[in-house]
Image (cartoon, rainbow, N blue to C red):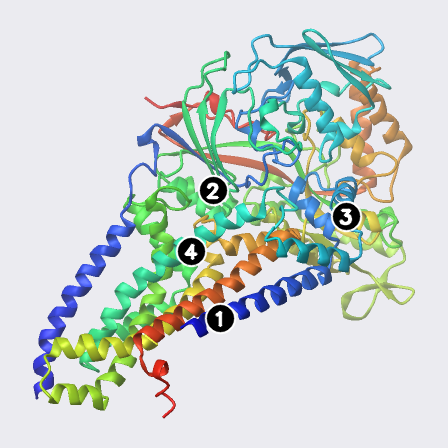
Amino acid sequence: MGRSGWSRRSRAGAAAGLAVMATAAAGCNAPADGDGGSSSGVLQVVGQFEVHSLDPATAGGTFTRLQVAETLVDADVDGALQPGLAQDWEASADQRSWSFRLRPDAVFHDGTPVTPEHVAAALERARAGEGTPLAAVPWSSVRAQPDAVQVELTEPFAALPAVLAHTSTQVLAPSSYAPDGTVTEVVGSGPYRVERVEQPSVVDLVAAEQWSGKEPGVQRIHYQTVGRGEARALMAESGQADVTFGMDPVSLQRLTRADGLDIESATLPRAILLKTNAAHPTLRDVRVRQAISLALDREAMATALLRDPEMAATQLFPPSLPEWHQDTLAPLEHDPQAARDLLAGAGWTPGPGGTLTRDGAPLSLTLRTFPDRAELPVLATAVQAALEGIGIAVEVQVGNSSEIAAGHQDGTLELGLYARNYSLVPDPVVTLLEDFDADGDDYGAMGWDDPALTAALTDLTGGGIDDAGATAARQQVAQVLQAELPVIPVAWYRQSVVVSDRVDGVVLDPLERSFHLTDVRWAR
Amino acid sequence: MLRVLRQRLVQAVGVAVVVSTACFAIVQSLPGDIAYRIAAGRYGYDQVDAASAASVRAELGLDRPAWQQLLDWWADLVRLDLGTSLVTGASVAHELAVHLAGSLQLAAVALGTAFTLGAPAGLLAALRPGGRLDRLTSLWVTGSRALPPFLLGLVLVLVFSVHLGVLPAAGHGGASSIVLPALTLAAGLSGLFARVTRDTAVQVLSSEHVRFAETKGLRASTVLARHVARNTGVTLVAYLGVQAIVLVEGVVVVESLFAWPGLGHALVHAVFWRDVPALQATALALALLVVALNTIVDLATLALDPRPRSGRAAR
């Protein structure tokens, strides 16, 4: 009929229209050049942590890692302290007065020289806020001297230089601050200058002309935050990223087979722990804590979930903390039968459904953890299964990271699974003193204390003991923690970075303080 | 038309008050200590502790009665002041603008692509129901809807980034970074558009007025442009509006897969951190966006379809 007549013609017309529209759409979406890879001369760096803030206290170390801002003291990849903004430092004989002499050629990226007044102001600002280990320092005052910064303490504190390497003490130029004290831009004194920040995901950097130290090997850097591990892996694999941090175990296994990529790894001074509430009627008994530890097949968990059997913890301190890791310590074992015997000794008898009971009450505990580190929820379920095997019923609650701290404060926490970084400052004793002193801490002991351990830690921070004494004190700390298990070590951490073969010189910092991008060079 | 705008304006004010108040009430009733959540967002999980939570509580006056906090928020809203984020300390209006722009950009390109691919295919399929093209579109619809976006996204990345190396795998920056996330969204949508266009067009084609137009001897292309396309458009525009809302609000998976900063991402973070001003502003923006899109759809439908204008639709 007539119908088929028009439909033939109109089909041709519509097809032409479709072609036009498709072309137009393609035009809108046309890929512009310069996005991927090193062809543009910009080093493409991809990481996992978002740029929430510009403020030193809350920026999560982004701008010290990117070498934009400097701290008075720096540290190398072994944790040894190095000059930063301070070229050297010394303490008075009584260790209460410290003088940090500034590098004379230090200049902010806006051209103003870094003066002792700027540094003193930055330290005062950091101290007034939260989220800084400065809170642990017995601080009296800070004063600007002609070419140095003078810090007075109320009592000796040997770890002061290590604390002044923490990112919260970074020194920014006055032009970084708005009149009300908020940070509006990051004007530092490091080898790289911020060109553009697009919160929460992008920072563009360019080599700072004011920098008088070693010339960076790469002039321009594009740092991008990508939340998902799979996406980061694909960016590395496709060549879009030159340097990719934060690889999950599964992606890493796949990338080892990819062409044109190298993988650098380092064991971190970080451990995954099961915190126990030692004031809890059940967990107060050290035999219950030991039974929990014996129930954990750490090697299986590390192999299956972290894809890295060597990360099974045998003690709290990983080998990456050589001064604290004790080779002589008997390793934590997996022995479910011994665990059951310990629980029987503590008065727990088999009840209905396989859960142990005592005085008619079942042995059931809640375990809180959080998903900020992807392996924590899966490890929590592995812990749950292991404890079920010895008759302990565990309810896993995956929530916000603050639930553990909040539960510590209101006393409702029973078990908490988290990762603790013992090198928040390069000297672990600062974090350990916080975590294991007599009052315990949100991410340390709860309802537990050991006077000998506290004394050993206090001796170590006071600095009044010789090397042999310090070694003995550290040994004692490790032994007490291993026997008493206020926190039960589960695994250690290995961090990896995927590096394209377009670049050389990538160094992975186990302390996670710096990306060391100044050492990166284009491969020839 | 003015009547429509006036109605929608009243609706927008009502929605703003209800949504922001509901948000406030919901956040207050969520489990967990708000101060701790905010401190976790600010200082990260290594540094959140009782001291940082206490300082957050004091700084933000979180221990004031809830009604006082709500009154403050209303007062700010009247002044069109969205406040500053409790976590990042940045202006909420600025953060919202960045995320809203990201979401709108992605939604617009995805919708445009889906419409460009789907509508003509549907129209062509409708010309011969049951024909080869019709069956092909059905296959496309089923296939594209059966693939979840994250899987499709990964496949596209594997093909275009890893193997062909022509497009960036993820990230936000440069014109080419939008192609893969937009295509991921558009692929699923284009099938739906083809289907809806096809069904509507078949219905219109078999209607009496089209047959009459053919009978009176109009050229096929004139019938298509003047009668079929326009009548199909009324349904399609409404459908487009619904999909636009779904896209802007519901693309969290695609946003996170491609590290694309959008409202979904912002909303999830704001809830997780109890960042009340950011949460309220984001929810408010989403609610107002629904009103705005509905208004645009109403106006476009009015322009396309004369019947409601003259009130003859009822008869």
* Outermost residue, bottom side: B315
Labels 4 and 1: the sequence-earlier one = 1
Which amino acid type corresponds to the residue marked 2 in the rendered image? Leu
Counting every numbered tag in the picture gives 4
Nearest to the observer: residue A241 or residue B51: B51
Q: Position of residue A273 (x, y in %)?
A: 71, 43
Q: Are marks 1 and 3 in contact (CB under 8 Å)?
A: no
Same subunit, tags 1 and 3: yes
Q: Which mark's residue is nearer the viewer, 1 or 2?
A: 1
- The subunit carrying tag 4 is B
Q: Residue flagged by tag 4: what amino acid is it?
A: Leu
- Residue to which mark 1 is pinned: B6
| Mark 3 and mark 2 residues within 8 Å of each other at the beta carbon | no
Could you tell me which secondary element the residue under label 3 belongs to? loop
Quickly name the residue at label 2: A252
The disc numbered 2 marks a residue on which chain? A
Q: Circle 4 is placed at which residue position?
A: B104
Residue A309 visible to the viewer:
yes
Count residues near mark 4 (Cα–Cα under 10 Å), then give few for <14, some for 14-19, many for 20+: some
Q: In front here: B156 or A22?
A: A22
Mark 2 residue element: helix
Q: CA distance from mark 3 to mark 4?
A: 35 Å
What amino acid does circle 3 point to?
Gly
